[in-house]
Amino acid sequence: MPVESQPESSVEEQKVNLLGLSPSEMVAFFESVGEKSFRATQLIKWIHQNGVDDFDAMSNLSKPLREKLKRVAVIKAPSIIKQWDSEDGTRKFLFQVGNDSAAKEGSSKNAVEAVFIPEGDRGTLCVSSQVGCSLDCSFCATGKQGFNRDLSAAEIIGQVWAAAKSYGQLTPKAPRSVTNVVMMGMGEPLMNFDNVVAAMTLMMDDNAYGLSKRRVTLSTAGVVPALDRLGEVTDVSLAISLHAANDELRNQLVPINKKYPIAMLLDSAKRYIEGVPDNRRKITIEYTLIDHVNDRPHHAHQLADLLKDIPVKINLIPFNPFGLVDYKRVSNNALRRFQDILIDAGYIVTVRTTRGDDIDAACGQLAGEVNDRTRRSERYKKSQLSANLKNGESGKPEAIRIVPRT
Ligand code: SAH
């Protein structure tokens, strides 16, 4: 079909989105269109350091080159559907990653979230890697919406681009800019390996965001073969979502544990950190504390024992309730007791303070919904209840899995 007769949208779709190209892919792109490879650096700087998405604004490119680029390429970040600002400075973004009308209706199939958390001179952006998630951890809101699709590299780095731009600055030295990125939003980053690695490469590239490898963190529930591969291509900081120190309990909280149990996961994590050329680095162990599920003193002792030969710091995350599950947040007493046991055993232990409470920006609550979450949960519970009753079941909603108290 001649180009002229194609609808404009399909011509646009065939263009390469330069936003998500890693430095080597950008070089390959320029070579493929018969241009010199140094153009790659110029483009990366324009896009990621200057926040420019309009070829005409790129003043060091000739007019013919700009016209050529317009014919074959676009620079397109996911658009911000909505933005919430918390009283504590946290800012949550809802990004459109699908077709317009569905996203405007708030369909979680077409939207992902990112959260910017300022803290002193640091600004941490929590970024999503997938629309939904297939791992279905029993305490995570994202898992409850199921898996829809992987985000492209442009959609992942586009969250950083758009968030930084929302503060008017893209360079790490600017106030209120993104100084750290954590892949802890929606999705399992290691299940979207290539796109996540390409986006992280841009985060660390000196011509793009220039973040050091210590300031880019990949968080995983434990996809062991992919973690083994990760060490071959990058050395970003690693966080492991552990949440339990024995397989029986972890199987219930993090079902992928049945495939890759704790010992296998920790071996892989250890190999990763040993491969990093910096012997001061530690793995962050994330442990979401749920009332009477995994917050008892014997759980803390078991955790201390499990991690004794691994360079770790432990981040305790009070569970954020979200309506679809009956779990409760850890009590303050249990949290303090748990932390003390680990500190006494010699660990560095931090507690993730809840930020952005007033805008539902907390971890595990990133479900890509525009609709009011409480009402959504109620609707969901009711629909599950009637579906189960129809099937002659007990009436307990299927998605609510209660982990026995141990
Ligand atoms: N799939 C990746 C990244 C997304 S989850 C992973 O599992 O690491 C990011 C972190 O938020 C994980 O440690 C996860 O366990 C935690 N989290 C998820 N739901 C939560 C909730 N409701 N309350 C507190 N933390 C939660």
Image (cartoon, rainbow, N blue to C red):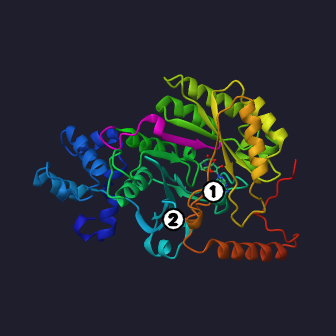
Residue at point 78% right, 62% down? Answer: 326
Q: Nearer the viewer, mark 1 or mark 2?
A: 2
Residue at point 73%, 76% (across, down): 383
Location of residue 309 (image quadrant): top right
Tell me which numbered mark, 1 or 2, is placed earlier along the sequence.
2
Residue 166 against residue 232 in the figure, above or below:
below
Indicate yes or no: mark 1 CB to ligand 1 under 8 Å. Answer: yes
270 relative to 295, above or below: above
Residue matched to label 2: 87
Ligand 1 within 8 Å, label 2 CB: no
Q: Which residue is mark 1?
A: 364
Residue 243 position by quadrant? top right
73 or 257, which lies in front? 257
| Residue 258 appears in the rendering | no
Q: Residues within 10 Å of mark 2 (few under 14, many from 20)?
A: few
Relative image position of residue 47 (x, y in whole percent)? 28, 51
Q: Is residue 48 visible?
A: yes
* Residue 331 coordinates in the image, percent (x, y): 77, 54
* Residue 138 lies in the magenta stretch: no
Assess whether mark 2 and mark 1 are in contact (beta carbons under 8 angstroms). no
Secondary structure at badge 2 equals loop
Which quadrant would the N terminus be assigned to in this image? bottom left
Residue placed furthest toward the left: 63
Q: Is residue 63 above or below residue 324?
A: above
Is residue 216 found inside the magenta-colored segment of the image?
A: yes
What's the residue type where badge 1 is placed?
Answer: Gly
Question: Quick one: 80 or 387, which is closer to the camera?
Answer: 80
Which span of residues is magenta-colored?
Answer: 206-221
